[in-house]
Image (spheres, rainbow, N blue to C red):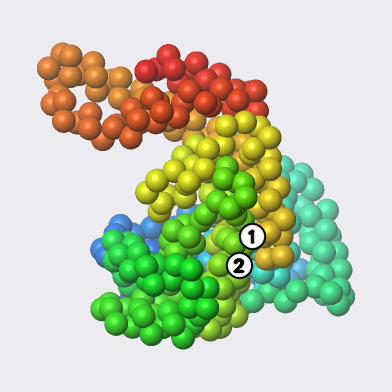
Amino acid sequence: MSDQQICQTCGNEQLLRSQKYCRKCASDNPYYDPSNLISYNHDSQNQPRIKRSEPTKYAVQLARALHSEGIKIQLEPEIWYTSCNFYTPDILVNKDLIVEVDGPYHEEPQIKKNDRIRQRALENSGYLVYRFKNEEIVNSLDYVLDKIESILNEFEHNSDRKTAPQLIEMEIPETQRMSNVSENLIKAYSIALNSTLVGKMEKWSTSYFKEFLSQYSPTPIGNRCAMERILFMLLGLNLRLKSDLQSTIDFEHYSMLFDKSLGVMKGLFGEAAEIELKNAYNITATNFVKNLIFYGKPLIARIRIVWIKDYESIVFHISDFKRQFYRFGIFVEESEVKVECLGELDRIENILKERNKINQQINQNQINDGELRRFGWLERWIQEDLKWLHWLEDWLHYDKSLLVLNQ
């Protein structure tokens, strides 16, 4: 049997056995084969493939109702909002309106934060995002349908609206959407390229990047995902302090380099890649600020760049970041940084518990003490950095003693 079938309900000629429902009408797929799930490998270096989630019954119910009203829909399409990652919204209506149907899971702080950040990236791309709850689909379906039709009418007649870019499905070539270069090589290329860029802003250009990176094999030139990763690493390597304020990150310089990075992506791949790079940074910016708070550096940097030791310092850095990056449609909100920091503290607390468990096993001669070496960074972090995190207790309403007691 061919993997591609024709939907008997709507005539969709691209019905795949990996899809439980037809994407164009949400009807049941009689050819569905769960053992043949299509997924995408985000790294060509033989990494595990990513299994796609299935739409909820509430999303399917709404999608079917919209189709019955003659409204064009796509159920869980792939929107490549960055060069390396795609997002599958519940329903895409008329190529511009993303409709999400949220259950209780989306009320969790970390999930709500992720939803807000992703929504900003999608809206910056020209999409309109609207969210409904499961119970609205069950109890007020007619109201939901009327609301969506009203949104579509208003959106269509808004002359100031952006037009959503076509970043859907196979419109991005497979050879460009997956990195063809391993992470180790990307890091090596970035460090080598950066050694020629220090103090030379004029070299942040499409022509220079193409000339320099073309000498390597495999070359990242021509692969938008690999180039996105390289540019992010270069930005991390070039983060610096203000000369007049040695405890403050120079976000003005950082934003200038980001602007140059956008130009490189646009020159290599066109406007869509420029939008994708903005989206990628929108998604990671909150995590970037969290790393400044905890570790004083982006992940790529080897040494601490800044010490953020009080509430005033973090508020200043967030405000300065927003002031320099708002022109790109990139924002960081204090409330979202708090959620990210709480998640980091929980992660560290869990690692501490695991370390203590291994310690007990060592004492009982159940495990070799070499296993403990992987917690070396945590030992240093506790000894050197934890002592000044007391200000986080009030800001995050988090009991730092939970970490201390687990030592």
Q: Report the front residue among 381 and 107.
A: 381
Image-based side of 135 in relation to 155, left or right: left
**Could you tell me how far apart the alpha carbons at marks 1 and 2 are, in whole angstroms?**
6 Å
The image position of residue 361, as x and y in percent, is 20, 18
Q: Residue at x 57, y 66 (%)?
A: 258
Q: Is residue 340 above or below residue 259?
A: above
Secondary-structure class at tag 2 = helix
Residue identifier under label 2: 256
Q: Is residue 10 above or below residue 370?
A: below
Within the image, what quadrant is residue 392 found in? top right
Q: Is residue 91 visible?
A: no
Q: Residue at x 45, y 75 (%)?
A: 224
Q: Report the front residue among 148 and 275.
A: 275
Quadrant the C terminus occupies: top left
Q: Is residue 307 visible?
A: yes
Q: Report the front residue among 89 and 191.
A: 191
Q: Which mark is residue 302?
A: none
The image position of residue 330, as x and y in percent, is 66, 59
Given the image, on which type of amino acid does mark 2 rest?
Met
Within the image, what quadrant is residue 213 found in? bottom left
The image position of residue 396, as x and y in percent, is 62, 28
Q: Residue at x 57, y 60 (%)?
A: 254
Residue identifier under label 1: 252
Q: Answer yes or no: do the residues labelled 1 and 2 have beta carbons within 8 Å?
A: yes
Secondary-structure class at tag 1 = helix
Given the image, on which type of amino acid does mark 1 rest?
Glu
Quadrant the N terminus occupies: bottom left
Image-based side of 308 in relation to 229, left or right: right
Q: Is residue 133 above or below residue 363?
A: below
